[in-house]
Amino acid sequence: MQLGSHWIAEIEAFAPEMLVEPQRVMTFLNELPRTLSLQVLGMPAVQQSDDGSVRGVVLLSESHASAHTDPTRGLVYVDLFSCASFEMEEARRIFLQFWPGVIKVERMIHRGEP
């Protein structure tokens, strides 16, 4: 029996200036679950580091979503784990909408499979 799906992705962003915007991470973490019909349990927690990187997480009734920017390398990482089903293609579309770029890594792991 499958417990849930865990999607991880990494984008090399076309516009590195977008990687230092806490509001962009906040909006993404609100929009991603809403678009995928997942239930948000509260406001995303977002923090910016001295180097400009931004990281955030939002708890979902189904599990969690997180995003982390790395402006020094021009990368954005996202992680979505949910026991409710969701469309990876739709998650990818939202990710690229917020940070246009090239997907360098993408994996879907089905948790709980034998």
Image: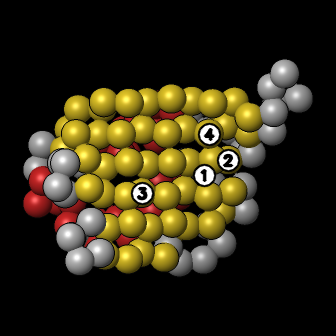
Q: Residue furthest top?
A: 114
The quadrant of the rendering that contains the N terminus is: top right
How many callouts does the rendering have? Answer: 4
| Residue at (38% x, 77% y) in the render | 47
Q: Nearer the viewer, mark 4 or mark 2?
A: 4
Q: Give the mark nearer the N terminus: 4 vs 2.
A: 4
Left or right of residue 29: residue 23: left
Q: Position of residue 49 (x, y in %)?
A: 29, 75
Which disc is residue 67 wearing? 3
Q: Is residue 13 above or below residue 112?
A: below
Residues marked 4 and 2 touching at CB (< 8 Å) = no
Tag 2's secondary structure?
strand
Tag 1's secondary structure?
loop
Q: Nearer the viewer, mark 3 or mark 2?
A: 3
Q: Nearer the viewer, residue 111 or 99?
A: 111
Task: Give me the C-alpha separation between circle 3 and circle 1.
Answer: 18 Å
| Residue at (53% x, 78% y) in the render | 43
- Can I make out residue 71 in this image? yes
Q: Residue furthest right?
A: 1
